[in-house]
Amino acid sequence: MTTRLKTFGCGVAALALAFTTACSAGGGGPAADLSYIAVQDGQVTDTTTNGVSIAATDAIRYGVNDHPIKRSFDLDAPTFETFCKRKLQVYRVDVPVTADTEPYAASRLRRILTLVRQCGGRLVVVLQTGFAWQDRTDAGRYPAADRAALYSQGYDRTLAFVDQFRGEPIDWELGNEINLLAAGDDGFPLFDRGWTDAEFDKPLMYDWAAVLRGMSDAIDVIRQRPGGATTRRVLNTTSSNFGFLDFMIAQGVKFEVIDYHYYNWEGADPRALYRAPPLPAYNLFKKLATYKRPVIIGEVNAAEIYHDEYANSPTDALTQKGFRSFRNTLQFFRDQRELTIEAVVAYEMWDEPEKPAPENRFGLMTAYGQPKLSMSILTAFAGGPLPASERQALAAAGLLPR
């Protein structure tokens, strides 16, 4: 994740990976008044329910981002206890497909897929090839390091990895927030700009187009194989960087679904988002609808989290403002009728205290397993059971869905 104040995306970071070889179903869970779905020996079973359920009133599926590939198995139990019981349905994860990660990434993803399916959920997998770490040769496999090599890197890695999961309930995302790597003539990222494909007419973007076209073509092959017809490709963008989508379409990158990342402040209205002058404000829903593809909001949280004074405490005024911002955003997405939004996926499941601020505090759960009000808000929109204490807290703060 790159630190930035934005109405745009907050990246799924792929970090150095380390794993244990044994699977543990232990580990601490959420707060004591949560009713649980137990995850033991790869199985999901209901336990007692003492919460208050708020019925879902729309077809949007709600979910969370998480980073399970880079960690040991000890958080699987509390993660999926929370995911299942709160009726979340989408689990978005980043997966590196590189020479040194691919074998155990596939094994790890199979276990995660089992747990998600037992909760009735769907996976969104963000594929990251070696070029995400500036490796043009794929660990020496393609020594020419030219755009043909980049295409082969994307094609070969994607075909080999994704075909192992053909027919499974997984959407495959082609990289993450690549649009933010483009810079304007002033050398700065295209925040609140990037409306046209011409702004992405840069050598680096042509390099990335080669990688993404390879990934896209590989999934084309899988879609033609038995059981592969429903395999979907996803491309994401942030801010007003719709020119990135147009540029990649022109370069032959195919995708069925758009993933848009949204982080904004209390009081912001997605029907009138800021663009750098002289361009006028724009309606996010109407703009996304012009692509005539289903949309997921693949990352969403409050922009207040980026503020230096954000204390990540329920008694902190700025944190409370962030909860209102998050709730209002979900309300906007649910109430609009101009766009088909399939899913809204919060960033992210857990706080990550090992990271520097602000990347350490986006979690809907604390590192100690306590749900924040943001998790309660997401649960309410998802129609999951809320413990009475959480529902009372949301009602007192005016944070229940309307």
Image: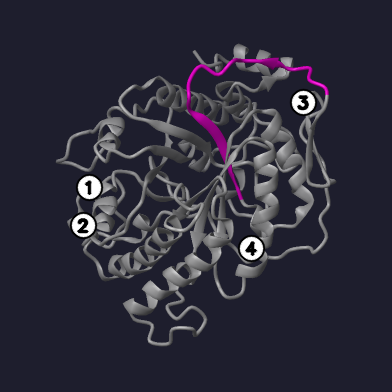
User: Quick check: marks 1 and 4 in contact, CB under 8 Å?
Assistant: no
**Residue placed under numbered mark 2 in the picture:** 199
Q: Rounded to the nearest whole Å, what is the CA distance between mark 1 and mark 2? A: 8 Å
Residue 277: say if magenta. Answer: no
Amino acid type indicated by mark 4: Ala
Closer to the camera in the image, 169 or 266 = 169
Q: Secondary structure at mark 3?
A: loop
Label 1: state its secondary structure: loop
- Mark 1–mark 2 contact, CB under 8 Å? yes
Quadrant position of residue 63 = top right
Between the residue at mark 1 and the residue at mark 4, the CA separation in whole angstroms equals 36 Å
Task: Determine whether the residue tagged by mark 4 lies in a helix, strand or loop.
Answer: helix
Q: Above or below — where is 146 with respect to 273? A: below
> Which of the pair 182/138 is nearer the observer?
138
Q: Amino acid at mark 3?
A: Leu
Q: Nearer the viewer, mark 4 or mark 2?
A: 4
Q: Secondary structure at mark 2?
A: helix
Give the residue pinned by disc 1. Answer: 195
